[in-house]
Amino acid sequence: MDVGENGGPVVELRSLSKSFTEKKTGRELEVLDHLDMEVRQGRFTCVVGPTGCGKTTLLRLIGGLEVPSSGEVRFEGRPVTGPGPQRGMVFQEYALFPWRTAVRNVTFGLSLKGIPHKEARALADEYLETVGLTGHEDLYPRELSGGMKQRVAIARTLAALPRILLMDEPFASLDAQTRNGMQEFLVDLWRRTGTSIVFVTHLVDEAVFMGQEIVGLSRRPARVVRTFENNLPYPRSRTGAEFTELRARILEYLAVEMSE
Amino acid sequence: MRKWKYISPLVALGLWQLLAMVGVLGRTPSPVDVAEGFYDLIVTGLPPGYYLQWHLLASLERVLVGFAFALVLAVPLGILMGWSRGFDTVMDPLVEVVRPVPPLAWLPLAVIWFGIGIFSAAFMIFLGAFFPILLNTITGVKSVDPHLVEAARTLGARRRAILLRVLTPGAMPSIITGVRIGIGIGWMTLVAAEMTGVKSGYGLGYLILTARDIARYDIVVAGMVVIGVVGFLMDRLVKYAEKRLLGWM
């Protein structure tokens, strides 16, 4: 089995369709239409597309938070039937437990596994150190800035030892300065851990700065998927000619998709 | 600004004494009469030997028993109803039909079931406190951010962990609001229950009733003051618990 080997497909989407029934009108809303896609092991994959094109739905299907209308989602060769810690999700809204301190947010998943309190606490401290939050362990989410909250959320997800990180516009609520810092942090973290990442964003710059593969979705219902390879070396510059050129190509592709 | 919060009771008290001294209050006791009533209650008791503190303890005991039952039943039921739409659909009509029935209307049945004594009174408290706690718990669970439940599921949480570690703490602010309302209503219900027939010789409601029968209006008012102050203190206690439990908010 080539599953788990570097470069093999870790996530496979086969002819994946998803539609929702609008509550008010009762109309069927097609979000994804026979979409095919693969995510390769250990790669940093970014999914871009216009707002409302189904990027989030795509990610939630991989995460097991939604059930496909037809087609299938496979993770490491097996059909996805529900959420699980091996597919860690990071949400735009952070989704931290407000009644738990930073460190106790991180221990949440650890104690579910039955890891004793002391050991969980020590592990959580390590993960908080990984995301650069040492010294903030005992603060509640309301006492943390947006960037710090998202770091806690990432630490919490990493502590569950996911084999893939699914990130849904995690930096969208941050100011531009903090966002750039978080992008650099995430690239660094990924290079240190080697976890596969699927990162959804509507910002092409963000995708080009971080992603090795940039998947462009068409407007809703998303079916056409075009993958751009991005072989620029890390750490990347946001101003280089190649960066600008690739960004222009993707923007052009998206513009064409939107106008059709 | 803090010292000003005592101004309204003090002014009311002064005005009340003034009106009594002018002589427009008739048989209504003045604050000084009430103070004397307190003295009699503590030293002699009413009926003699039945001291104020024993009346108070009897009432508090009933409240605590009834309230404890309400808390232990309403919170888990509310969490299940808030979490499961199916269970809510099944239970809601029953709750909504029983809820409007005033606790005192249950008194005749309570007496058949529990006899005259602490459990009949406690049952009244239970009924008064149960529904505010239940409804607030349901609301609290429904208001928990669905992202938190999803995050928990992706971290490996199953049903039990979702209920106990996400929905329960998430609903806590609302549950505590329900507890505050519930204990207040329970306290008011108790006195009424004691006045209406759940008599055991002790209890603040029973005390007021006895004082009325012998036209000791000073003691009637003294009983009212105790009820008011105890209600106030209970609310303070819940507020304190709220501060300790909800420090994260």
Image (cartoon, coloured by chain):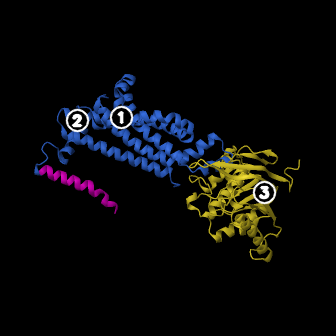
- Measuring from the top left, give residue A17's x and y in whole percent: 73, 49
**In the picture, which chain is yellow?**
A
Residue placed under numbered mark 3 in the picture: A195
Residue placed under numbered mark 1 in the picture: B102
Instruction: Quote the CA–CA distance across marks 1 and 3.
Output: 61 Å
Determine if the magenta segment contains residue A40.
no
**Which amino acid type is shown beneath numbered disc 1?**
Pro
Report the quarter where the C terminus of chain A lies.
bottom right
Decide whether the magenta segment is chiefly helix, strand or loop: helix
Instruction: Quote the CA–CA distance across marks 2 and 1.
Output: 36 Å
**Which amino acid type is shown beneath numbered disc 3?**
Thr
| Secondary structure beneath label 2 | loop
Does the residue at mark 2 contact the one at mark 1 (Cβ under 8 Å)? no
Let me know if residue B14 appears in the view.
yes
Subunit of mark 2?
B
Left or right: A57, with B125 as reference point: right
Does the residue at mark 1 contact the one at mark 3 (Cβ under 8 Å)? no
Question: Which mark is nearer the camera, 1 or 3?
Answer: 1
Dot 3, how many residues are within 10 Å of its Cα: few (below 14), some (14-19), or many (20+)?
Answer: some
- Measuring from the top left, give residue B204's x and y in whole percent: 29, 36
Q: Earlier in the sequence, mark 2 or mark 1?
A: 2
**Which amino acid type is shown beneath numbered disc 2?**
Thr
Q: Which mark is residue B54?
A: none
| Secondary structure beneath label 3 | loop
Residue placed under numbered mark 2 in the picture: B44
Q: From which residue to which does the magenta span run?
A: B1-21
Subunit of mark 1?
B
Dividing the picture into quarters, in which one does residue A248 lie? bottom right
Dot 1, how many residues are within 10 Å of its Cα: few (below 14), some (14-19), or many (20+)?
Answer: few
